[in-house]
Image: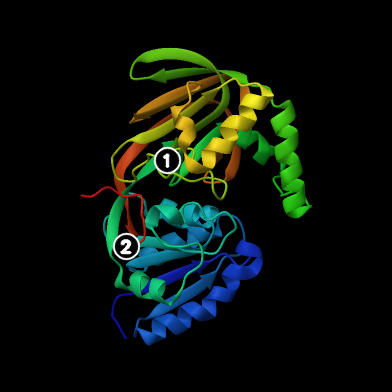
Amino acid sequence: MSNIKWAFIVNPVAGKGYAASMAEVIKSEAALRKTDVIIEFTRGKGHASELSEKFYNEGYKFILGVGGDGTFNEVATPLTGKNDVVTGLVAAGTGNDFIQILGFPDRFGSGDWDTLFKAETKAMDVGFCNGRFFFNGMGLGFDAQVAAENYTPEGEVKPGGRNKYIWHILKTLLFYSEKKMIVLNDGKESETDCFINTVSIGRRFAGGFFLTPEAIADDALLDVCSIRRLGLLQRLRILMMVPKGSHINDRRVNYYKTSQLELGFGEKVPYHLDGELFFSDKFEIKIIPRALNVIYNPGGGHFFGNM
């Protein structure tokens, strides 16, 4: 067995239990490559971060998540800024947007395990918003309101599954009211009525919407897609363009890159960081360049630059 320690942190409820089923697969694939691994299951919100920090303190050099974007956020948060450890993800959630950055598929095949255990690495940028890290992106406006509609006041996902989620999308599409947003970027202040405002490291959101299609995960810049007030037909038209990323050519879309910005609203509004829901009226957002070492797939259509 290798002397290099690998730890896998599994969220057993991710992907409706699919992540839990990956534990035996990981053991088998690691054994084929004579790699020593430990696998731990999370027991609730925040536990993945606790396990990640514990494994780091115990000297593990590879600490990976098994689950969705939220699981990866918890695993990666304690490892950000540490240059003596590498993280990664075995995607096993539902949306699986973050994994696109790394160039791996939503579901691993046999060749992907070879690539994973070869452990070719990149140092990726990390976003920071209101005291929290994000690794794919943060969003305000329409998509955040859809997320808010899908949660109870206690923070639990409402029952009803995919059909209920589609209903929340349709209801928000029809009745969402844009709020005035103050933007401070590069020393200049402006204001807009916010339909969508996405700030990202990656490109893909909500399982297939390329809101920031030009994002590079190690260019030391945040990509910002800001869409102003739209009528119903305009909303439909823009949202139909987003899966291909062609919306950024529309005059109603302001797309730019920056290293930091501040946003303000007249009231608290919902926002999401890597899919997790929060509320605030002020946002201080910045990039932390190349702050996290990750395993990536060099031949998999990753979102890193050529350097």
Which residue in the structure is indicated by mark 2? 299
- Residue holding disc 1: 213
Relative placement, left or right, of 263 versus 238 is left
Q: Secondary structure at mark 1?
A: loop
Tell me if I can see residue 152 in this picture. no
Q: Residue 202 at x, y = what percent?
A: 42, 45
Instruction: Say what amino acid the circle numbered 1 marks.
Output: Pro
Q: Secondary structure at mark 2?
A: loop
Residue at (53%, 56%) from the top-left corner?
96
In the image, residue 144 lies at what x, y percent? 61, 36
Residue at 35%, 37% in the rendered image: 287
Residue 94 appears left or right of 101: right
Residue type for callout 2? Gly
Residue at (71% x, 49% y) in the render: 156
Residue situated furthest left in the rendering: 307
Mark 1 vs 2, N-terminal side:
1
Question: Considering depth in this image, is 234 or 259 the residue closer to the camera?
Answer: 234
Left or right? Give the position of 138 relative to 167: left
As rendered, which of 239 and 207 lies closer to the eye? 239
Residue neighbourhood size for the residue with mark 1, other residues' Cα within 10 Å, grouped as few (<14), some (14–19), many (≥20): many
Residue 20 in sight here: yes
